[in-house]
Image (spheres, rainbow, N blue to C red):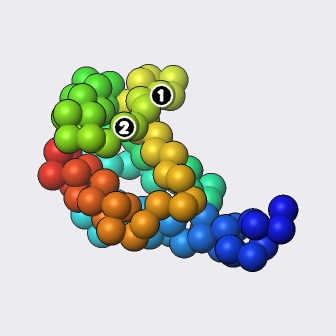
Amino acid sequence: MEVIEEENLLERSKVIGERMAKFLAELNNPKIAHIRYKGAMLAFDLVDATGQPDAAAAIELRARAFEQGLLMASCGMFGNAIRIMVPITVEDEILEEGLQIIAKNL
């Protein structure tokens, strides 16, 4: 508990979540829907051109990202949600690298 307070890890968790959500929203990508987060854990849905869940796009994004060193989970009732769980100790440069991998592979 002492380390959490000393290193301000709860605030760091909030900053990471806000950074990821803002980044994804600013992509203005029509494939991205319903961005939500709690601290450093974030999820977003992938949808097709009609707004329907797109599980195939989630599988493809997850596979491409994995090939580039980024591990994400696909989940949700329709398999179209991408979940990202970032360690709260992540360096800003590493976080940015991961976000760029997502953007590049959408």
Which residue does the image show at 27% across and 41% down from the upper left? 69
Disc 1: CA contacts within 10 A as few (<14), some (14-19) or many (>=20) = some
Disc 2: CA contacts within 10 A as few (<14), some (14-19) or many (>=20) = some
For badge 2, the amino acid type reads Leu
Which residue does the image show at 69% across and 75% down from the upper left? 8
Image disc number at residue 43 = none
Q: Compared to 38, does 16 lie above or below?
A: below
Residue 32: percent from left, percent from top = 32, 49
Question: Quadrant location of the C terminus?
Answer: top left
Could you tell me which secondary element the residue under label 1 belongs to?
strand
Q: Compared to 57, does 33 lie above or below?
A: below
Residue 30 makes an appearance in the image? no
Residue 68: percent from left, percent from top = 20, 41
Q: Compared to 99, does 66 lie above or below?
A: above
Per the image, the residue denoted by label 2 is 71
Looking at the image, residue 31 sits to the left or right of residue 45; the answer is left
Which residue does the image show at 22% across and 51% down from the upper left? 101
Q: In terms of depth relative to the viewer, which is nearer, 34 or 102?
A: 102
Image disc number at residue 75 = 1
Q: In terms of depth relative to the viewer, which is nearer, 24 or 7?
A: 7
Kindly report which numbered mark, 1 or 2, lies closer to the viewer in this rendering. 2
Looking at the image, residue 17 sits to the left or right of residue 5; the answer is left
Whether residues under marks 1 and 2 lie with C-beta atoms below 8 angstroms apart, the answer is no
